[in-house]
Image (tube, grey):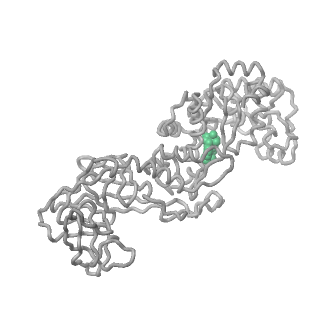
Amino acid sequence: NGSTMHVTNSRAALAAHLEATGGCVVTRFPPEPNGYLHIGHAKAMFVSFGMAKHRGGRCFLRFDDTNPEAEKQEYIDHIRDIVSWMGWTPYKQTFSSDYFEELYQLAVKLIRSGNAYVDHQTAEEISAYREERRPSPWRERPMLESLQLFEDMRRGLIDEGKATLRMKMDPGNNNYNMFDLIAYRIKFAEHPHAGKGWVIYPSYDYTHCIVDALENITHSLCTLEFESRRASYFWLLDALQLYKPVVWEFARLSLTNSITSKRKLNDLVTGGTVKGWDDPRLVTLAGLRRRGVTPEGINAFCRELGITRSDSIVHLHKLDFHVRAHLDAVSPRCLAVLHPLRLVLTNLAPDYLHHVHGKVFPGRSEETYDLPLTRVVYMEQADFRESKSKDYYGLTLDQPAMLKYAGVITAKDVVRSSSGAVVEVQADFKPLEAGAKPPKGVLGWVGQPRPGVEPSSFEARLYEPLFRSPSPADLGDAWLDDLNPDSLTVVPGAVGPPRLTSAKVGDRFQLERIGFFYVDPDSTINDTSNRLVLNRTCTLRDSFPK
Ligand code: ATP
Ligand code: MG
Ligand code: MG
């Protein structure tokens, strides 16, 4: 909003800003490289990258790296990769640490203008004093003394925890964030990007607004928890006479039965609860990608969410809805059987082989794939019952069914194991006659690639939400007790036709009636090994009661 900008920016600062941007919208997405990004970050990216794109402007990817202990190169690399996977192209990639020298010089300027002082209170003392609205005993020390001590801090002459630089704000203010926030602290830690040169590190509150100004950000978009920090954001830019961006807050996104906090995600990963940051049960973007979710699906979901200001927990089914819509458009269909039951078509010869044509995109294209039909085929265990009942359209001894694309089967007999379970169904096969009415039950099936050769099997991994409670983050310390024991079901012996079993990592399929699937990187497909693992991204239909 332009009018506020004119009022609150000094003429000189605004002129320099407009010179730099040419009046373009400039935004930034500023993740801290202290973990992998999650679905909430997809929303933040949609807001900042999306706004720049929509307005013909530009968006920085800024690594907000001011906490060296928590940050790692692995996370930097991952963030680059996943931002691009999400479809966003940063105007530039920058690091808050790129500005360490400038930030330091500005801190000196802040001290010189009487707007910062070196403090020696411990963290506990600072919070105790804050509670009582009592200023630090060091607050009124001479400016030159602070200047010297800050220099000593920088040179490593003062021990960790023995001094901080604090902004001289407004302790009487009702806003806690106006009570002399810390600008710098001492940390004898190497920095993953800036290297070994620094032993003092600027705080988020000090860094963020300054770097926004230095990068000529026009719209600084962040989540609502930062609203109470607006005052300090503008206070500091005013004190330094820097240009002030427009600040907008939007609601944080969380999803039901999930965790969207990097710290808790980190606990799950390092505690071994899940198999890594990209475990398909996590709502990290790496996990969603591995599960088979597409960036188009995620961005469609974010578009629907909009830039609301009311915090809410969004139902996982909303995400599934958009993911399903995109997967339906891009996933070739294929028949497969998760829990195979042997079906012998007794009227076919042992060497019978007929190539049935399955449709890749029924109704949309003529493309087909090969479904070998042989005397022995496999069908789902759940699609056979000995006797029929209301609303059951599967095969029974008194109800025929249709093998999809192939023909009609009529069950004649069963073979039982010693415990009495049906292990084989024997049936008559007949192509569907032209004009004849097909049976109501249309079944998936998988034949042998050649007569007498068993179809290759694959492992299907089926997922349920990782937590039982809709809002595990609200359970306090008990959040880890809320894990869903059934979040992963491994089905080892699923079978599919050659088209499926020759798939490559990253391929997607709509396995008819079973769900959308994605070929997991755990698959080893080469000359000596053929282990295929498919993740179910989501089911074909929403089972959520509306
Ligand atoms: P976390 O608590 O998960 O560590 P964070 O806010 O500390 O989150 P950052 O890496 O600093 O994580 O976030 C980068 C940007 O993404 C910030 O602008 C932040 O506001 C935004 N963001 C983070 N989490 C969410 C979320 N759940 N919903 C929307 N935006 C988010
Ligand atoms: Mg942050
Ligand atoms: Mg954080």
User: Would you say residue 398 is visible in this rendering?
Assistant: yes
User: Would you say residue 194 is visible in this rendering?
Assistant: no
Looking at the rendered image, the quarter that the N terminus falls into is top right
> Is 491 positioned to the left or the right of 438 in the image?
right
- Ligand 2 quadrant in view: top right
Residue under the image location 31 percent in, 47 percent down: 365
When the figure is inspected, residue 414 is found, relative to residue 152, above or below; the finding is below
When the figure is inspected, residue 382 is found, relative to residue 471, above or below; the finding is below
Find the residue positioned furthest to the front: 435
- Residue 158 on image: x %, y %: 73, 33
Residue under the image location 15 percent in, 59 percent down: 353
Residue under the image location 23 percent in, 70 percent down: 409
Residue under the image location 33 percent in, 50 percent down: 361
Looking at the rendered image, the quarter that the C terminus falls into is bottom right
Instruction: Give the image quarter of residue 403.
Output: bottom left
Query: Viewer-proximal residue, 421 or 19?
Result: 19
- Residue 505 on image: x %, y %: 35, 46
Badge count: 0
Instruction: Give the image quarter of residue 417.
Output: bottom left
> Is 498 positioned to the left or the right of 132 in the image?
left
Instruction: Give the image quarter of residue 406.
Output: bottom left
> Is 275 positioned to the left or the right of 44 in the image?
left
- Residue 169 on image: x %, y %: 82, 35
> Is 286 positioned to the left or the right of 244 in the image?
left
When the figure is inspected, residue 325 is found, relative to residue 376, above or below; the finding is above
- Residue 490 on image: x %, y %: 39, 62
Query: Viewer-proximal residue, 136 or 447?
Result: 447
